Amino acid sequence: MRVLRIVVRVVLLVALVIGGVALWKREEIVRLWAVNSLFAPEKIVGNFSGMDRLFLTRPLAIGAGPVSALPPAPQAVLPPEVGAWVEARGVTGLVVLKDGQLVHESYYRGTRPEDLRISWSVAKSFLSALFGILHAEGMVPDLEAQVVEFAPVLQGSAYDGVSVRDVLTMSSGVAFNEDYLDFNSDINRMGRVLALGGSMDGFAAGLKARDAEPGARWQYVSIDTHVLGMVIAGATGRDPADLLAERVLAPLGLERAPYYLTDGEGTAFVLGGLNLTTRDYARFGLMFAQGGRWVDAQLVPEGWVAASTMLQAPGGAAYGYQWWVPADSAEHGGDYFARGIYGQYIYINPARTVVVAVNAADTRFEEPGVDAGNLALLRAIAEGT
């Protein structure tokens, strides 16, 4: 009996310890569970319109200025295949602007116009816009400067020897597995760091391996954009998220105050954690379609708009400075686009002054031919508008 009582006490003590740890780490466990079920088909639509329920976040201050108008216009006749595309690609929001006027708007799968939707990698193009402003102002005048000059914590990492231009063009050479469907990939390890309240700066500094020499070839490496954010922070002494809100988002007259996902140190997830309404994504696209101008102010230097949306990556890769640029862009009005996983797009056709903003929850986004099919459909919308 004495042995039994000892065993019972030990079991109770272990249970109390486990319960205490679970309570202490409750938020981290909830966020980790959210990461593991984020893309579940039955949850993905709601999750993508409610990321603030699942992760650490911080709101962005955009002031109390008036909302900028998107005047309604006669509705565009969309290509007949749009209906099938919306269904196949899990589209949740579709906004089309022509000459600054709203010619189409529709929402699906129970979503609403006021939903703040996750950008995923569309956020990269927003950070590029901010960087272009700071570059023109002399904060980071030399694109060949080394990133460790602005982020010394990266010394000794795979980013030691990488230039600002290299991270802008996704040609850092850093070894990084971007396979979203591989649980052990670098991109998913990074997601768990974010969910558990770790440090994104520390994650970047911990990358040691290279697949290529800096600047030698293009390889899509999402953490490059975080390093660009570290450069901005080091060059300005300011938080990149606050600067983006101040210099880009507030002047656009957004409908709702956006927010970023953050790590445990409050650092914004600048490579993919921005949340806006679909109309507000379209407003940002319209500003670029107008050469960086909004109303009577030049928000982003016209030269940077042109440079960042041209082919800039080595080897002729279809990439500028954090924007996707099709190889045949010249044949389609000089078009370019921001793109995020699971079907997020801001497509811009400057020649026609058409912007198409898309939010989606496409669980089959990695299937062969999906990207090409999406581009063809976006072009059909723009060229028929």
Image: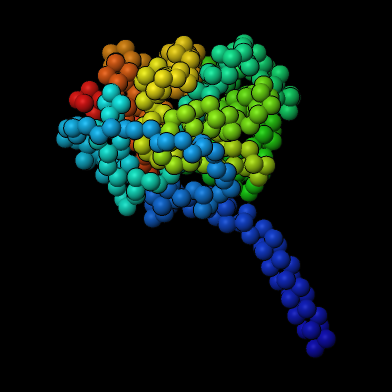
Q: Is residue 209 left or right of residue 317?
A: right
With respect to residue 335, does 37 lie above or below? below
Residue 372 appears in view: no
The single residue placed furthest to the front in the displayed view is 65
Residue situated in front as seen by the camera: 181 or 84: 84
Residue situated in front as seen by the camera: 127 or 184: 127
**Image quadrant for the N terminus?**
bottom right
The single residue placed furthest to the bottom in the displayed view is 1
Residue 223 position by quadrant: top right
Residue 380 position by quadrant: top left
Residue situated in front as seen by the camera: 274 or 255: 255
Figure label count? 0
Residue 130 appears in view: yes
Q: Is residue 54 left or right of residue 116?
A: right
Q: Is residue 173 left or right of residue 357?
A: right
Q: Residue at x 34, y 23 (%)?
A: 348
Q: Residue at x 63, y 16 (%)?
A: 139
Q: Position of residue 74 (x, y in %)?
A: 18, 32
Q: Position of residue 203 (x, y in %)?
A: 66, 36
Q: Residue at x 68, y 68 (%)?
A: 19
Q: Is residue 240 left or right of residue 118?
A: right
